[in-house]
Image (spheres, rainbow, N blue to C red):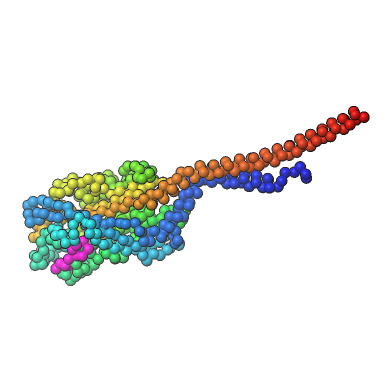
């Protein structure tokens, strides 16, 4: 027992060996471990950082509106409309996710979004600016009547004359946006059966965003995945207004899919595409890869709306089901079905990527991809948006109607009304955190390998040191014996 090495050396050697094995295992599985930890933090479940920042985002969000002022309305239709862009009228937007409910059976949560907008005095213009634009109330009435009988359409024609309706209206910017304005035709619409108004709610005033401020119904009821189940992402749309499919389209166009806009897919590549569901568009749109670059040291991939996103079946016949009728122009999306039959059509600002004929019917359109594109710049590995520019233009469809005097000679066209822009750019604090996370992802495996190697060396040294100690003691014992033997021989010789 005297030559046996101390027990603590075996403990050190064994413990170091186990830690070395664990370190090597962690190094091999580091990306999987990282993805698991990231998924747990991004999941929309109580007490996670992701959920707390999602409920009431503190990132400043500005909603900017550009109005088109119709400068030659009195010359229409003999002259094509000349449009002058006004704005932006900027509003600070705050949003809150309310009425949140969890559904554990399918790992989803339902909610509504409450938006509030506050006018920013730094806007390029005031809400008292006078703006001349297409009379949207009259245009909607005429559009809804296109399938009515002769007598009904003649009745509408007389009604428009009695109520003093004109092809254009001049209102303040505030009235056109959030405040709304009174119109005698709206009062008349209250006397009509729901079938004549396509079930549109009765209102006392008209404005493009009237009654949306602080409303819980502007985006409808949303239900998305929480991301807590393996292999799923948070924020993927499951239900909208309690429907699993879109009631406005048929076939594949009715499918409800994609992100609700707040969580992006991870591990994106140049071959990836992003599916984005937008309540304002009542559909899912495809964003294609555009380019890659670097922002504040972070690489990103930019995905945006391309010519095929609002395809009128020129690229793919599968998109025909989005037309809701004849596909007249490319680069345009018909949203009339989800706007109570109003002639609302969506495009990119200034008809970017749209059919050139759209711009030929008006003056003042100057499409510029740098100013008018819609894109998400996303850190591809983590799926975190770094720069977002959401832009859409609202247009009204008009065409001639021989039975309605006000519209007897108007050309078939899309009349630009306004376009909106929302820009979100991550701040320096978030960039710093993302850089740290990326370093952890990139170097975590290497660090684990280094730690594993260190413990392997410790285990090896401890083991070798034990053996050397044993041999050293044997050697010392032999030397002692030889010395005693020599001393004995010296004594004998001296005698």
Q: Residue furthest front?
A: 494
Q: Is residue 295 magenta?
A: no
Image-based side of 487 in relation to 387, left or right: right
**Image quadrant where residue 485 sits:** top right
Residue drawn at x 11%, y 54% is: 71
| Foreground of the two, 221 or 486 | 486
**Which percent across, then down, holds residue 215?**
29, 65
Residue 196 vertical placement versus 440 (above, below): below
Picture mark count: 0
Residue drawn at x 20%, y 65% is: 179
Image-based side of 74 in relation to 90, left or right: left
Residue drawn at x 57%, y 41% is: 453
Image-based side of 370 in relation to 255, left or right: left
Q: Residue furthest top?
A: 493
**Image quadrant where residue 484 sits:** top right
Name the image quarter holding the C terminus: top right
| Foreground of the two, 407 or 51 | 51
Residue drawn at x 36%, y 65% is: 98
Range of the magenta residues?
A: 174-186
**Image quadrant where residue 395 sits:** bottom left
Do we see residue 203 in this rendering? yes
Image-based side of 375 in relation to 77, left or right: right
**Which percent across, then down, holds residue 96?**
34, 62
Residue 155 vertical placement versus 424 (above, below): below
Main SS of residues in magenta: helix
| Foreground of the two, 336 or 176 | 176
Q: Residue furthest bottom?
A: 191
**Which percent across, then down, holds residue 275?**
34, 50
**Which percent across, then down, holds residue 67?**
18, 55
Name the image quarter holding the N terminus: top right
Residue 480 vertical placement versus 263 (above, below): above
Do we see residue 134 in this rendering? no
């Amino acid at each position: 027992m005297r030559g046996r090495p101390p027990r603590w050396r075996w403990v050190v050697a064994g413990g170091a060996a186990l830690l070395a094995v664990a370190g090597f295992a962690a190094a091999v599985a580091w990306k999987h471990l990282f993805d698991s930890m990231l998924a747990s933090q991004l999941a929309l479940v109580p007490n996670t950082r992701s959920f707390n920042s999602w409920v009431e985002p503190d990132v400043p969000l500005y909603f900017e509106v550009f109005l088109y002022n119709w400068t030659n309305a009195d010359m229409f239709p003999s002259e094509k409309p000349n449009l002058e862009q006004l704005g932006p009228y900027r509003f600070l937007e705050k949003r809150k996710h309310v009425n949140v409910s969890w559904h554990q059976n399918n790992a989803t949560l339902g909610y509504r979004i409450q938006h509030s907008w506050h006018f920013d005095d730094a806007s390029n213009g005031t809400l008292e600016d006078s703006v001349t634009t297409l009379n949207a109330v009259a245009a909607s009435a005429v559009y809804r009547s296109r399938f009515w009988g002769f007598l009904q359409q003649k009745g509408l024609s007389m009604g428009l004359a009695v109520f003093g309706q004109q092809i254009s209206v001049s209102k303040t910017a505030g009235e056109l946006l959030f405040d709304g304005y009174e119109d005698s035709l709206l009062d008349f619409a209250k006397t009509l059966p729901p079938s004549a108004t396509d079930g549109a709610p009765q209102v006392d005033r008209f404005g493009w965003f009237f009654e949306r401020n602080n409303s819980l119904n502007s985006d409808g009821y949303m239900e998305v995945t929480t991301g807590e189940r393996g292999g799923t992402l948070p924020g993927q749309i499951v239900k909208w207004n309690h429907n699993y499919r879109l009631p406005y389209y048929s076939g594949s166009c009715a499918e409800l899919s994609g992100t609700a806009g707040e969580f992006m897919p991870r591990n994106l590549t140049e071959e990836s595409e992003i599916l984005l569901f937008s309540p304002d568009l009542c559909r899912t749109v495809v964003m294609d890869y555009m380019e890659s670059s670097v922002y504040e040291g972070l690489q990103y991939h930019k995905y945006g709306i391309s010519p095929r996103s609002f395809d009128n079946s020129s690229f793919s016949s599968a998109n025909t089901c989005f037309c809701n009728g004849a596909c007249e122009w490319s680069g345009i999306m018909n949203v009339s079905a989800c706007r109570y039959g109003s002639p609302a059509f969506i495009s990119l600002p200034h008809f970017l990527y749209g059919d050139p004929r759209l711009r030929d019917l008006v003056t003042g359109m100057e499409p510029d991809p740098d100013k008018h594109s819609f894109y998400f710049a996303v850190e591809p590995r983590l799926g975190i948006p770094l720069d977002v520019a959401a832009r859409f233009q609202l247009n009204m469809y008009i065409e001639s109607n021989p039975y309605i005097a006000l519209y007897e000679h108007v050309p078939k066209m899309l009349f630009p009304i306004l376009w909106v822009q929302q820009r979100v750019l991550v701040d320096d604090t978030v960039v710093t955190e993302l850089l740290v996370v990326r370093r952890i992802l990139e170097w975590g495996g290497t660090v684990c390998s280094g730690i594993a190697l260190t413990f392997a060396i410790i285990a090896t040294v401890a083991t070798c040191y034990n053996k050397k100690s044993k041999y050293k003691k044997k050697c010392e014992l032999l030397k002692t014996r030889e010395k005693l033997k020599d001393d004995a021989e010296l004594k004998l010789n001296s005698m």
